[in-house]
């Protein structure tokens, strides 16, 4: 989709800006078969690597492939997958959101405070969501309408939101949630399908968490939006060439504002689900999560230069990082090595997505191995 949008935008650029070489970047795309498009995509190869890793670890450590461990892995990466969907939208525009982890901390404290004040759970969740969306609105305003760099704005919000979380909580854990505490825990700890005498699911089917199912629903919605809406075409156009998109009538500022609002929304949803799962609220919630979310998004194929990204890539990148973490623990490798592995995969993912002669290194290599037939 991104290529088709960019082709339309480039075609409307002045000849001096577009140039013959830029137009040639898009011509080969028309000649690619569906199979070639799939195997040249980064999410496809990440999926292959993920499947290979799962098979290898299951063979080496049988407990890795149990339904209990599958349920554990899916529950652990689901919040990151939810947040990666929002981060993908921001990165497609050519921006970045460093504040998502701190927004999580603020959201969980605000919601926790209203619960301790014995407000109904839906009021507490609404106030937590409102605080997160307010942070996203501030980010979006300064990036889209003031024109400040997203790195600077969201780095500032990272500090502001975390500081507010500490102040509001008086630097204490919140756990006395009043009469609606059971409902909050049920939301965060719900599983489906369930094992038990009265439930239909056999034990080899994992009990998947509410976080996982929320991630799946959001991914389907975002995937539909990316593939079938004009809003998404505008989003990719902004990432491909913001000035050209503006000249063609795309409401650039409004769409960029919405992108940061959506990123804050996904961080808020993940935070509220973890609030229910943990049964408590701490202001350190989400600390360092922004780096893992960005890593998952980039590994899943989103380009830090903008203009590329998929909902599937965001989910598969999140799953890949969690499977690596889980595999390292089961293999008895020091957990301190996690950062080294994650950093290496980020560099590799960016390397595969780098442009050379108008194509990614991966696509150029595949084109050499599988030359197109002459027309």
Image (cartoon, rainbow, N blue to C red):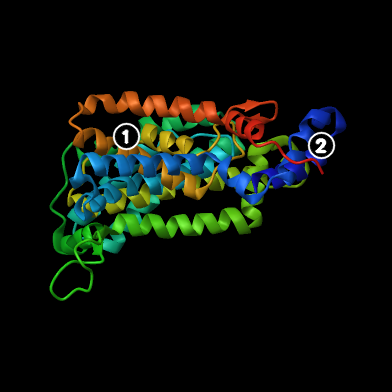
Q: Residue furthest right?
A: 15
Q: In x, y percent, where is residue 37?
A: 62, 45
Residue tagged 1: 162
Q: In x, y percent, where is residue 271?
A: 31, 48
Mark 1 touches mark 2? (CB < 8 Å): no
Residue ID at (33%, 55%)? 212
Residue ID at (38%, 31%)? 291
Q: CA distance from mark 1 to mark 2?
A: 43 Å
Q: Which residue occupies the foreground of this view, 374 or 73? A: 374
Q: Which residue occupies the foreground of this view, 274 or 163? A: 274
Per the image, label 2 sits on a secondary structure element best described as loop
34 left or right of 221 in image: right
Looking at the image, is mark 1 or mark 2 earlier in the sequence?
A: 2
- Identify the image quadrant of residue 303: top right
Image quarter where the C terminus lies is top right
Which numbered dot is residue 100? none
Q: Which residue occupies the foreground of this view, 84 or 310? A: 310
Q: In x, y percent, where is residue 238?
A: 66, 40
Which numbered dot is residue 13? 2
119 left or right of 30 in image: left
Residue ID at (75%, 38%)? 244
**Residue 266 in view in this figure:** yes
| 260 lies above or below 157 | below
């Amino acid at each position: 989709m991104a290529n088709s949008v960019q082709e339309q935008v480039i075609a409307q650029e002045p000849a001096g800006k577009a140039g013959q070489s830029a137009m040639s970047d898009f011509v080969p795309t028309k000649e690619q078969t569906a199979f070639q498009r799939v195997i040249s995509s980064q999410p496809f190869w990440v999926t292959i690597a993920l499947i290979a890793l799962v098979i290898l670890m299951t063979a080496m450590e049988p407990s890795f492939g149990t339904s209990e461990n599958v349920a554990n892995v899916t529950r652990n990466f689901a919040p990151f997958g939810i947040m990666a969907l929002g981060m993908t939208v921001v990165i497609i525009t050519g921006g970045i959101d460093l504040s998502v982890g701190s927004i999580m901390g603020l959201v969980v404290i605000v919601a926790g405070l209203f619960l301790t004040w014995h407000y109904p759970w839906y009021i507490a969740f609404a106030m937590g969501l409102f605080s997160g969306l307010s942070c996203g609105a501030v980010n979006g305003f300064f990036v889209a309408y003031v024109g400040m760099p997203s790195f600077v704005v969201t780095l500032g919000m990272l500090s502001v939101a975390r500081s507010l979380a500490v102040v509001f909580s008086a630097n204490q854990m919140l756990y006395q949630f009043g009469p609606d505490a059971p409902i909050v825990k049920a939301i965060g700890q719900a599983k489906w399908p369930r094992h038990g005498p009265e439930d239909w699911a056999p034990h080899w089917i994992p009990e998947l968490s509410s976080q996982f199912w929320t991630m799946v629903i959001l991914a389907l919605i975002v995937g539909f939006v990316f593939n079938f809406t004009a809003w998404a075409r505008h989003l990719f156009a902004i990432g491909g060439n913001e000035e050209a998109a503006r000249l063609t009538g795309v409401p650039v500022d409004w769409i960029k504002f919405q992108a940061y609002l959506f990123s804050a929304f996904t961080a808020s949803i993940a935070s509220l689900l973890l609030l229910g799962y943990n049964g408590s609220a701490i202001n350190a919630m989400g600390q360092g999560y922004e780096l893992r979310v960005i890593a998952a998004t980039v590994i899943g194929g989103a380009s830090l230069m903008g203009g590329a990204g998929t909902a599937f890539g965001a989910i598969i990148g999140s799953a890949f990082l969690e499977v690596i973490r889980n595999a390292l623990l089961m293999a008895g490798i020091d957990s301190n090595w996690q950062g080294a592995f994650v950093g290496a995969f980020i560099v590799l993912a960016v390397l595969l997505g780098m442009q050379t002669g108008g194509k990614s290194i991966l696509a150029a290599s595949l084109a050499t191995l599988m030359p197109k037939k002459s027309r």
